[in-house]
Image (spheres, helix red, strand yellow):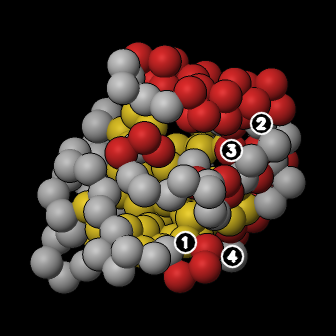
Amino acid sequence: RELLARVRAHLRRAKATETADVFFVDADYGWAVGHGGIVLRTQDGGHHWQQIFDGNKAAEIELSEAKAQINLVESRIRKAQRLVKEGDDKPFLSVYFLDRKRGMVVGAYGLIYQTDDGGNTWHSLKGDMDNGSERHLYQVNQLTDGSLLVVGEQGRVFIQDKWGQPLRNPLNI
């Protein structure tokens, strides 16, 4: 209860209106996500929190990576440009970390990012999955076989069989 109060206080200072998810890999390392695309990290069990990512940075990464893909349709670039223009109003809804370094956040409008360094840098996975109408992504979790499961709007399900691989849609919904 005290931990959640500290998380909410830090999210409010970061201009996030709501806490959507909190995840700890051990007693010290944890991450929290919320509206405004805010991602916070603690390394001391939640006593202190640092903002490490936000919706503006997420939008800029999406635009940069969309432009970098030679065979990408122009619609992804237009959507990424719209994200940059609209700013940080898209919430992250779920966070999951395999360990202190490797983690994923998912959110509204198909936002999905991975980090390999505890959240210092992020990589968009939006172009690696078939979610063309940008359905919201609500939850990310690990299955017993070690793969990551992402569940989204309208029954969308994506699986990342191994860290760093593209996500696949086994149900083809």
**Label 2 crowd bin: few (<14), some (14–19), many (20+), radius 10 Å:** many
Q: CA distance from mark 1 to mark 3?
A: 17 Å
| N-term-proximal mark, 2 vs 4 | 4
Residue visible at 56% across and 34% down in the picture: 76
Residue 143 point in image, percent of width and height: 25, 79
- The quarter of the picture where residue 167 lies is bottom left
Residue that mark 3 sits on: 37
In the shown orientation, is residue 170 left or right of residue 80?
A: left
User: What's the residue type where badge 2 is placed?
Assistant: Asp
Q: Residue at x 36, y 26 (%)?
A: 71
Which is more N-terminal, label 1 or label 2? 2
The residue at which mark 2 appears reads as 88
Which residue is under mark 4? 1
Q: Which residue is mark 1?
A: 152
Mark 1 or 3: in front is: 1
Identified at 45% across, 24% down, the residue is 65
Mark 2 residue element: loop
Distance of mark 2 from mark 1, alpha carbons? 20 Å
Q: Are marks 4 and 3 in contact (CB under 8 Å)?
A: no
Q: Residue 102's mark?
A: none
First in sequence, mark 1 or 4: give its number: 4
Query: Which callout, 1 or 3, points at the residue further toward the start of the chain?
Result: 3
Q: Is residue 17 above or below residue 59?
A: below
Q: Where is residue 28 shown, x and y percent of the image? A: 40, 54
Task: Looking at the picture, tell me which residue is in the foreground, 151 or 99.
Answer: 151
